[in-house]
Each structure stands twice: as C-alpha cells, then as structure tokens.
Amino acid sequence: MGRWVLHVDLDQFVAAVEVLRRPELRGRPVVVGGDGDPTKRGVVSTASYEAREYGLHSGMPLRTAARRCPEAVFLPVDRAAYEAASASVMAALREFGYVVQVLGADEAFLAVDDADPEAVADRIRARVRQATGLACTVGIGGNTLQAKLATGFGKPDGVFRLTDANWYPLLGDRPTDALWGIGGKTAKRLAAHGIRTVRQLADTAPDALAAVFGPATGPWLVSLARGRGASAVTDEPYQARSASREVTYQRDLTDWSEVRRQVAELAEHLVAELDRPVGRVVVKVRYAPFTTHTHGVPLGEPTTLPEPVVAAALAALDRFTHRRPVRLLGVRAEYAGPAG
C-alpha cells in the first residue's frame, strides 16, 4: 500500500456546464465570456475544446474570437451555475472517504492509500460523471506537483501517472515554465542565466540560484525541476488568496481624472466583499487596443477599512506613467493571511 496524490481536474469546466444545460450545443464550438455578446468588449472566460481548435483561448478578446470562429456559440458568464456544479463535484469526491483539498472551482487533490491508484482514479471519474454529468481527468503522482502536472498528460477524460521514473523522459526537455509554480517572468530570468529546460534547471546547484533568486526561492526552483513537491494533502477549507473587481468599458476612458474616479469606485465596492484583512492592493490597466499592465502597493498594516485600500489603489494607479486611452480597469486586494 503506497501513498499517492491524485489531482482531479474537470475538463473544460465552464463550457461543459453550459453544454449540460444546452445539450444541442454538444460538439459545437462554445465560448463563454462577458455578457455573451461578441460585438461588445470583453474577454473569453472559457472556450470548449471544439473552439480551441480555432485558436480560441481564455483571455482573448471576444471580438477576436468571433472573427476567428464565426460559427462559435457565445454565452454569458453564469457564476452561480458554475459554483453549484463545483459544489456537487466536491461532494462526490468526499464520498470516497479520502482527504480532499479543494484548489478551486474545478480541481482538487486527494490523498489516496491504495496499491492500484489507477483503479481509484477510474472510480472517481465514473462517480463524478454519474453525479454531475461532467468529465474529469485524474493525475496520479507521488506528490502534489507530480499529480498536478500528470493531468496535463491525461487530458481530456483520462488518467495518467507521473513519478520519479518517468519525470525526466517526459519533462526534461520542456521549458521551465512547464512546471507548476514557474511563470513566464521567472522563465525569462532563468533563460537569461542559460537555464531553459527543466533538466537544465534540475542540474543547477541550488546555491547558484540562491544568489540570483534568494535563499528560499532559488533552491525551491531547483526542487521543482527535480519533481519534488508537497506530499501532504489537507482538507482545510479552500480560501481565496485575493479578491478582485474589474470593468471593461465599451468606450475608452481618455480622461485620467475619470480613470482615477473609476479606480476609487472599484476599490470601494471591493472592500465591501472582503472577508479578512488585506495586505496589498494591485491595479490592472488595459490600454487600448489590448496591452495590459499592473502595479501593486503594500499597505502599512493589514486592514479591511475602505480608506487605506482606496488610497493604496490610487497610489498604485499613480505608478502608471502612460496616459493612453483605457479599455479595462481592475483592482485586486491580496489578503494578508488566512481567515481566523
């Protein structure tokens, strides 16, 4: 009996929920985003697998998606429906009696002690489909990192095991940002030091990276490349790390006094939704036609009061030096710590 971590990841979750409600859309390219009107400004939240074949993806402007795939069906975002579907999936996972760690609306880790984790994975997939009608992929690994990446090899609607035995054959020659936890910016910094692949990163001395990325982050990056991740799975309730609000404007904002007013208003509305103290505020500005930048400001001390949050949002906005027309504004409040 060995301990395994299973990562359950729902396939094309939002699009799949919509297709369940509208079976006539099965097999057609489906795009969910904004209010469902591709003639308006907005971005793709989710594209079905059929839509992805046309190059459509999350974050793409709806108008671009409509040009690339005129036959796509565009639907509005319905968060309540997705939250309800997610709750049903997580309830089905907990029926197995394993520790379930919810990562978000469409994914979770399970700690499984079983000699045949593939058989467990198949039972999970069958139960989720029976309970909700949704398909999921299950990744199996010796830790959370391996299990998380394994689902990418098993999609869609499959099972895949990733362990130390096949880690380097599968991932060694891939770019460093193929690893869960390494984004584009970190990958570029690594590339600047001649480290472009997972194997190159794994072969790097931790002390060498500590000098570049810091004593904690440097060795951690090497550890990721070697397939090392957390083995513990906790059933503590999932807590978001931040809360955010954003608005896409159908007409560009050209007056930056209006931009400031809008940012302050977004921050005020956001404060009303906070459930614990905030330690940092980030403002996102998307200029016309479609370039996005962010700036963040830490708070002097954690708070849920509106005045310091609004002040931090405006201070972050002041860091934007360009005064070009704006098509989208967003404010994100990053929580200072877990709920008490």
Image (cartoon, helix red, strand yellow):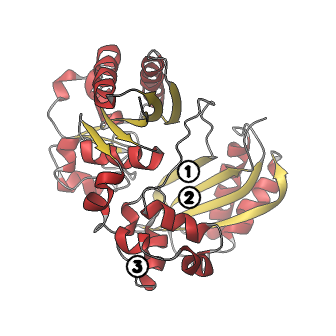
In the picture, the quarter occupied by the N terminus is top left
Query: For numbered disc 2, what is the local secondary structure?
Result: strand
Q: Amino acid at mark 3?
A: Ile
Say if 2 sits above or below 312 in the image.
above
Q: Amino acid at mark 2?
A: Leu
User: In the image, which disc is placed on residue 329?
Assistant: 2
Which residue is the site of mark 1?
246
> How far across and how far down the image is residue 168, in percent?
31, 61
If you read the primary sequence from the N terminus, does the residue marked by circle 3 or circle 1 appear first?
3
> How far across and how far down the image is residue 86, in percent?
45, 26
Say if 216 sits above or below 200 in the image.
above
Q: Quadrant of residue 75?
A: top left
Query: For numbered disc 3, what is the local secondary structure?
Result: loop
Q: CA distance from mark 3 to mark 2?
A: 35 Å
**Could one spot residue 326 in this view of the protein?**
no
Mark 3 neighbour density, 10 Å: few (under 14) some (14–19) many (20 or more): some
Residue toward you, 73 or 17: 17
Q: Amino acid at mark 1?
A: Glu
Which residue is the site of mark 3?
195
Query: For numbered disc 1, what is the local secondary structure?
Result: strand
Residue pictured at 49% horizontal, 71% vertical: 186
